[in-house]
Amino acid sequence: MSSAISFSAKKQLPLALAFLALIIPMMVDIPGLEPAGQRVFGIFLMAIILWVSEAIPLHATAALIIFLQILLVSDKALFALPESFTAPKYSVFYAALANPTIMLFLGGFFLADGAAKFNLDRNLARVLLKPFGKSPSMIVLGIMLITALLSMFMSNTATTATMMAFILPVIAGLPAGDKLKISLALCVPFAANIGGIGTPVGTPPNAIALGAISEQGLQISFLQWMGLALPFALIVLLAAWQLLLRLFPSSQKEIDLNIQSTFDTSKPAMLFYVTAGLTVLLWLTEPLHGMKSSIVGFLPVVLLLATKVFGVKELQGIQWHVLWLVAGGIALGKGVSTSGLDAWLIGLVKWGAIPAILLAFTLALLALVMSTVISNSATANLLIPIGISLASSGAVDIPVLQAAFFIAVGASLAMALPISTPPNAIAYSTGAIETKHMVLAGSIVGAVGVLLFVFVAPQVWSLLHLIP
């Protein structure tokens, strides 16, 4: 009981600060900011404090954002707004919970949970790792490529847990003092974080970015996102591989892996394999059939529930809290844009005096730094509305797509501390690495990734006409 009271006491200060941050902007006259904007500004400041401090769960803050925007700036607001302000319907904020991006991510969760249920992820890892032989360097490469591939369609956390369970016996079998232990322990979370960049369903920041982009009337297909992200994610992955081998080289010439795999051939498993394969195929061929990726993402939900491959238990086990967190970010972005807060924030700085490329780098770097110490989803939720507002206002010469994309990528590349991402925490818990190892390697990989995406990727996109 005393520990619970002590824990609660630690949250009292951020809760009090969050409350003050919410009400003060509504009680004072902020020059140039209309009442609706002041109310959303208060909600925005409150969200920053609660998401950074985690005084309440991240998804609870997201739900609170939706609720407060309905109460304060919708057509059902409890307190009157000026007649000159056209308040959005309250259903607009509720609609964030059923946004097409949410449906896309929900489908990804169904595929990820099904893969874990039928051990498809572990069996695929075993089969795919066989061609990489016994060389330590090639085994590390194989593990990273397989982890990145799985994390493109599965939760990064689930992928890391699966792969760490697979390689922990390998780490335990290495001689004491062999630095390969560090490479093996770090290569999994690094690959999971990097691989998640490759698809819209790979990580929550991607979903948040897509949701914000769609609010601006831009539609990015599953394949388009992969075209923009995957080649450069692969380059970052290979750079991370080489970095780990050089920082933590192996003293062994060969490693003998005992690789065995038996695929589940039961009827439910076969139904899942067909559903997963069909879903991924439709995602990758969207330009051919024209069915939006969010609609395709709902396909596994319907098929797996209708065929009873997934029951109530599996449905309850879906990571609903992540979906609520993404929805909160979408709703916050809607509030920022409809209340005039975006225009006010933009007017505070002479953005035109800042080179566009420098501003893009700053947004990505800020996302990287923030995500190192707080949730990457929370970081994306806070920064993407600002980045989108800057780009859509015309104050800076940055396309809306790139503004959201760079922030999402920067958030996903944060991997310098055990607390940066769940994959990092899982790897750290093995005891095979120290924090200094993660700080050194993670900082370099994150910095290289941001530089590559911001300064090189746009040039290639433009050359190949990949930017819509």
Image (cartoon, rainbow, N blue to C red):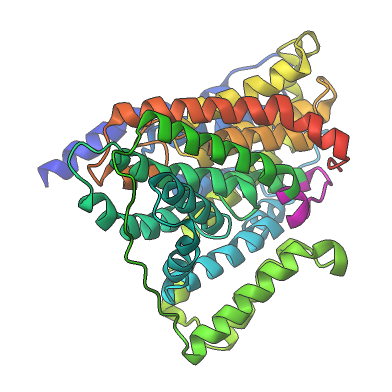
Q: Position of residue 448 (x, y in %)?
A: 57, 26
Report the number of discs: 0
417 vs 400, left or right, is left
326 vs 315, left or right, is right
Q: Quadrant of residue 449?
A: top right
- Could one spot residue 304 in this view of the protein? yes
For the C terminus, the image quarter is top right
Compared to 255, does 312 lie above or below?
below
Instruction: Name the residue located 86 percent from the left edge and 66 percent from the top edge.
Output: 288
- Could one spot residue 67 in this view of the protein? no
Q: Nearer the viewer, residue 183 or 217?
A: 183
37 vs 250, left or right, is right
Instruction: Name the residue located 77 percent from the left edge and 38 percent from the top edge.
Output: 401
Write down the region rendered in magenta. Answer: 214-226
Instruction: Name the residue located 37 percent from the left edge and 27 percent from the top edge.
Output: 439
Does residue 462 belong to the magenta stretch? no
Q: Residue furthest front?
A: 253
Instruction: Name the residue located 88 percent from the left edge and 40 percent from the top edge.
Output: 465
Q: Position of residue 122 (x, y in %)?
A: 42, 67
Q: Position of residue 107 (x, y in %)?
A: 61, 67
Q: Residue furthest left?
A: 2
Q: Nearer the viewer, residue 291 or 14?
A: 291
Q: Quadrant of residue 365?
A: top right
Q: Nearer the viewer, residue 445 or 58?
A: 445
